[in-house]
Amino acid sequence: MFAFSDYFLVRRVPLFGFSDYLLARSVLLFGFSDYLLARSVPLFGFSDYLLARSVPLFGFSDYLLVRSVPLFGFSDYLLARSVPLFGFSDYLLARSVLLFGFSDYLLVRSGPLFGFSDYFLVRSVPLFGFSDYLLVRSVLLFGFSDYLLARSIHWFAQSVCFFGEKAVSK
């Protein structure tokens, strides 16, 4: 009926606005190929939890875990592996992420979106004017070949320090 090929367990489900719980295995309805677990899910504006494996809907090829996610303006947590949506090829972990104006934390590995070839960690990043911390390895965006560590960066302005064997040797 709903294209569930294995199991389907719900409690007080009013069609698409799930009022309590949804647990399914091999769910083909929303493009989830393995598992879907949600609590109080009003269609796309997930009001509590969503856990899925091999989710091709938003371009997540392995795992997706979110809490209180209003579609793209993530209000709490997002954890994914092999995420090609924003150009991140391995991991994405964020807390209170407002699309591009990250309000708390962002951690990625092998993110070719901004030219970072290995790691990217920021706290309270208003797009390009980083208001707190930035730590990367093998950064090709600003021409740093190994490490970049900065605090209170407003574009190219304040308190920039970088270190690393490759950067020092050059």
Image (cartoon, rainbow, N blue to C red):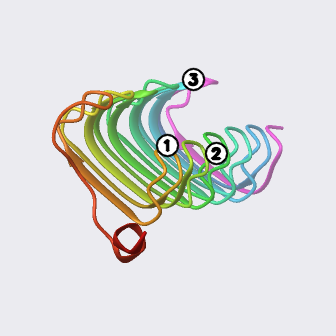
Residues tagged 2 and 1 counted as in contact (Cβ below 8 A): no
- Which residue is tagged 2? 87
Disc sitting over residue 14 in the figure? 3
Identify the residue shown where x is 37% and y is 45%: 94
Question: Which numbered mark, 2 or 3, is in the foreground of this view?
Answer: 2
Q: Hey, what amino acid is under mark 2? A: Gly
Which callout, 1 or 3, points at the residue further toward the start of the chain? 3
* Residue lying farthest to the front in this orientation: 170
In which quadrant will I find the N terminus? Answer: top right
Q: In the image, is 165 to the left or to the right of 79? A: left
Question: Which numbered mark, 1 or 3, is in the foreground of this view?
Answer: 1
Span colored in magenta:
1-18
Q: Does the magenta stretch include residue 161?
A: no
Disc sitting over residue 38 in the figure? 1
- How far is mark 2 from mark 3, CA to CA? 36 Å
Q: Hey, what amino acid is under mark 3? A: Pro
Label 3 environment density (alpha carbons within 10 Å; few <14, some 14–19, many ≥20): few
Identify the residue shown where x is 62% and y is 24%: 16
- How far is mark 2 from mark 1, CA to CA? 26 Å
Which callout, 2 or 1, points at the residue further toward the start of the chain? 1
Which callout, 2 or 3, points at the residue further toward the start of the chain? 3
